[in-house]
Image (tube, coloured by chain):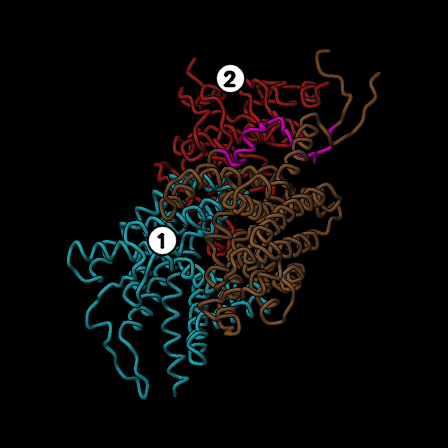
């Protein structure tokens, strides 16, 4: 059994004074797409921020490619090959669309993703590349945010609620692009409020409930009942 | 079933207030047991304690960090000299006059500089102090750039006999310190004071509770300016001579004051008092003043800001939040855990 | 014609003030930090150049080339070792720490060099002048102004056309997310301070060539820089140049009225603009 790409064990993460995660246990194998679902406040975003290094934790609580990374700074984690598309997109308003993408590639990690390829994936961005990024529509900004993360050619891509605040039609078109993103064996974690969408793109699903894992299984096999119970903790 | 009650007093604060009362009685009697030099030193301590308490109210509670309070110290000094030398006012009457002048001048100043925020506000206060300094240097009636001395005749109006005068100036300084600390204490216990603490902790939340942030800060600025001006008048009544550079010295009236408050503990009533005592203890024991002393002070203040931003008093009181001056309301009668 | 001459001189003086201000403006833009010791660092640069010129026996222009990297390195270390620890939401720590720094620098210079006024000797070029029509214009003031324009143009270029500038803008926008891009915030802030110090070094050397200086004048240089920034508007470097020019002209016109009015006139114009246009003339960001 090959070592999991990402291994989380005994993660106690805090959000200010408030403890958000309690001894979290989770593993992500190479090439897998794992969906993380759960109600608001279940700890999904705290989990994302912990793995990406925005929240510092115990070193051994999070291991990536076998290395302890729990206490590393976010820029160090990024250099190791973990990229986060943060909740709310959070583009840089002072930078144009193209500059946002270029700065995503700041690290210069080798890999298949570059500007021309991103513009092929999201053609609308090529037309608007010199516009200040935050002047775009919500859906277009989401494309920029995803592109920005891809530009670092990560080994693990994490997407936190990419459908938040977007119209269903837009969400649909973004999710249609996902196979093109993860198709080449990119390992991904997708945090989603929309359970159906989450299950449709992932091979495994993990449900969080009040800071703990309440369900973990293959997306194709879990039942609605099991998810309901795990989601609401009943 | 224990009854719950809310009170401000703790055993510690009761003891402290008692000790304070006794100390004040002793200090009031100082002209009889202290020598001339000691009396002067005590007077200086009280004046700096007043300046420090006022600066702390402004910066530590209202969040208005001023590096230009020397504007009002100098204004107070010049108002005293103008009132006595030019308008024939009795020096004791000139003191409250100076205070009123400080309040009147500070209002339009506040209107101007409140347009700036944070560190830019701080530099703005400095500009105002510079404007005052340069303007007063133009007044030849008050000695222009080189300054002027207080005529002996005016000094004699205070009291006949040197020891009587020195006792009077001492009591004025002691009285001022009691007035300033007492006023700040009373203010912080009042509704306005609680509003101020709320603003300091979270301005947005305070605003949403209906607290008029601008008005509260404006009031604090004007009152602080008035009392600082009064302190300045008393300072220069003691010095008997004034010049623009001495009156508006950033070193004397801002740098030392800031260091006192930072080292003592910003944002508490006890902090400035303790800081003043530490500062004077250091000053009296260090043989040479001047550049090395200021460098040491600056370095200590930086280290404290980085390592122990709550200052000496903050270190002493620890997480328990002990108070000598009863400010916070606590719930009494709670059953302790584990009982 | 005297008045036209005063306006021209004031404009050129404004170039120096703009250089005082550019370093201040830069770090505020990137880190929202206002460095109270900024003026004293300008004076420190002048003293560094003084010692350099004495040690090496060369002209201040040559020493400038050495002073810039020296001050830049100093700025980087200062930021990483001391100032980075003050960054956060609370305004008190950076204010009080830079204030303490200001006092330390002033008194250290006093102890090392005494309070005697010093000057950087640049030779004949200090008095060289040429005529534009009926007005006589000094060569040095023109060099200073041209340098100011070049410095600001250079900073603009760095900000908008280089990876470093992108890093500055991104970190200034969202510190956290910039880290996700692999940018070490502590390092980016250090580089911003280093760049600011490089500009400050240039300003300090030109200050030292123009007038005599002593350890105590740092405060007023900070104030002039600050006034130029506020008049011009926050977040706009070309605005800062305009602010510097307005301040310079206000001062020289004030001096024409009465020699003692020079600095006061500048303050009055500043306060007036603060009253009627609190955000400055060409603001781009809020304070």
**Label 2 in the same subunit as label 1:** no
Q: Residue at x 43, y 42 (%)?
A: B297
Is residue A167 highlighted in magenta? no
Q: Residue at x 81, y 24 (%)?
A: B4
Camera-side mark, 2 or 1? 1
Residue C42, percent across and down?
35, 57
The chain drawn in brown is B
Residue C205, percent across and down?
29, 61
Q: Is residue A219 left or right of residue C4?
A: right
Q: Residue at x 32, y 64 (%)?
A: C207
Q: Residue at x 69, y 46 (%)?
A: B183
Residue range highlighted in magenta: B308-330
Quarter of the figure that contains the N terminus of chain B: top right
Task: Tell which subunit mark 2 falls on.
Answer: A
- Circle on res. C41: 1
In the image, B155 versus A223, the foreground residue is B155
Q: Secondary structure at mark 2?
A: strand
- Specify the colour of chain A: red
- Circle on res. A9: 2
Task: Tell which subunit mark 1 falls on.
Answer: C
In the rendered image, is residue A172 in sight?
A: no
Residue C94, percent across and down?
48, 45
């Amino acid at each position: 059994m090959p070592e999991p790409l990402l291994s989380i064990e005994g993660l106690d993460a805090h959000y200010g004074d408030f403890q958000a995660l309690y001894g979290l246990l989770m593993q992500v194998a190479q090439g897998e797409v794992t969906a993380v679902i759960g109600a608001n406040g279940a700890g999904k975003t705290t989990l994302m921020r912990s793995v990406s290094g925005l929240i510092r934790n115990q070193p051994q609580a999070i291991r990536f490619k076998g290395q302890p990374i729990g206490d590393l700074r976010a820029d160090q984690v990024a250099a190791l090959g973990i990229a986060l598309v943060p909740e709310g997109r959070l583009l840089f308003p002072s930078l144009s669309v193209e500059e946002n993408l270029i700065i995503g590639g700041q690290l210069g990690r080798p890999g298949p993703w570059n500007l021309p390829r991103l513009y092929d994936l999201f053609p609308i961005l090529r037309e608007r590349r010199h516009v200040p990024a935050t002047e775009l529509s919500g859906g277009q900004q989401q494309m920029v945010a995803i592109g920005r993360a891809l530009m670092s050619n990560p080994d693990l891509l994490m997407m936190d609620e990419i459908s938040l605040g977007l119209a269903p039609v837009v969400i649909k078109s973004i999710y249609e692009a996902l196979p093109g993103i993860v198709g080449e064996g990119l390992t991904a974690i997708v945090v989603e409020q929309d359970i159906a969408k989450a299950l449709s793109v992932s091979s495994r699903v993990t449900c969080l409930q009040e800071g703990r894992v309440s369900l973990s299984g293959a997306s194709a096999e879990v039942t609605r009942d099991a998810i309901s119970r795990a989601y609401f903790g009943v | 079933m224990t009854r719950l009650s809310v009170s401000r007093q703790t055993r510690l604060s009761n003891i402290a207030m008692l000790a304070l009362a006794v100390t004040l009685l002793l200090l009031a009697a100082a002209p009889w047991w202290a020598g001339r030099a000691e009396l002067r030193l005590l007077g200086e301590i009280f004046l700096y304690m007043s300046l420090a308490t006022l600066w702390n109210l402004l910066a530590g509670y209202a969040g208005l960090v001023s590096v230009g309070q020397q504007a009002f110290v100098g204004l107070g000094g010049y108002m005293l000299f103008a009132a006595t030398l030019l308008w024939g006012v009795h020096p004791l009457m000139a003191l409250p006059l100076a205070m009123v002048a400080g309040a009147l001048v500070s209002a339009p100043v506040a209107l101007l500089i409140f347009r700036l925020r944070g560190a830019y506000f701080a530099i703005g206060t400095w500009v105002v102090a510079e404007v005052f300094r340069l303007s007063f240097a133009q007044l030849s009636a008050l000695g222009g750039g080189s300054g002027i001395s207080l005529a002996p005749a005016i000094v004699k109006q205070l009291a006949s006999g040197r020891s009587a005068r020195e006792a009077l100036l001492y009591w004025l300084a002691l009285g001022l310190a009691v007035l300033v600390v007492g006023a700040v204490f009373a203010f912080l216990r009042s509704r306005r004071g609680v509003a101020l603490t709320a603003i300091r902790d979270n301005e947005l939340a305070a605003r949403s509770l209906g607290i008029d942030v601008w008005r509260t800060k404006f009031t604090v600025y004007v009152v602080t300016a008035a009392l600082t001006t009064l302190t300045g008048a008393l300072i220069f009544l003691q010095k008997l001579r004034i010049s623009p550079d001495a009156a508006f010295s950033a070193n004397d009236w801002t740098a030392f004051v800031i260091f006192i408050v930072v080292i003592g503990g910003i944002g508490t009533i006890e902090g400035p008092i303790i800081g003043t005592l530490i500062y004077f203890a250091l000053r009296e024991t260090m043989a040479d003043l001047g550049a090395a002393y200021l460098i040491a002070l600056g370095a200590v203040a930086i280290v404290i800001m980085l390592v122990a931003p709550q200052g000496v008093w903050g270190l002493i009181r620890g997480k328990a939040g002990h108070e000598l001056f009863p400010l916070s309301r606590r719930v009494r009668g709670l059953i302790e855990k584990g009982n | 014609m005297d008045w036209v001459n005063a306006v021209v001189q004031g404009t050129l003086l404004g170039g120096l003030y703009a250089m005082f201000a550019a370093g201040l403006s830069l770090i505020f833009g990137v880190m929202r930090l206002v460095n109270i010791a900024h003026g004293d660092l300008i004076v420190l640069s002048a003293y560094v150049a003084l010692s350099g010129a004495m040690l090496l026996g060369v002209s201040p222009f040559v020493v400038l080339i050495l002073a810039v990297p020296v001050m830049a390195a100093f700025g980087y270390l200062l930021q990483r070792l001391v100032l980075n620890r003050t960054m956060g939401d609370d305004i008190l720590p950076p204010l009080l720490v830079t204030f303490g720094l200001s006092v330390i620098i002033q008194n250290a210079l006093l102890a090392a060099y005494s309070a005697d006024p010093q000057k950087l000797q640049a030779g004949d070029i200090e008095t060289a002048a040429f005529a534009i029509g009926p007005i006589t214009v000094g060569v040095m003031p023109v060099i200073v102004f041209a340098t100011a324009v070049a410095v600001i143009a250079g900073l603009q270029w760095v900000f908008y056309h280089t990876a470093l500038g992108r890093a500055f803008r991104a970190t200034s926008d969202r510190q956290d997310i910039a880290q996700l891009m692999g940018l070490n915030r502590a390092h980016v802030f250090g580089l911003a301070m280093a760049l600011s110090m490089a500009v400050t070094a240039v300003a300090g050397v030109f200050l030292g060539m123009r007038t005599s200086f002593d350890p105590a004048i740092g405060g007023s240089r900070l104030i002039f820089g600050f006034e130029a920034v506020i008049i011009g508007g926050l977040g706009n470097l070309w605005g800062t140049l305009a602010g510097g020019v307005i301040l310079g002209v206000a001062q020289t016109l004030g001096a024409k009225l009465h020699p003692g009015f020079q600095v006061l006139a500048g303050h009055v114009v500043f306060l007036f603009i603060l009253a009627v246009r609190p955000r400055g003339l060409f603001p781009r960001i809020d304070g």
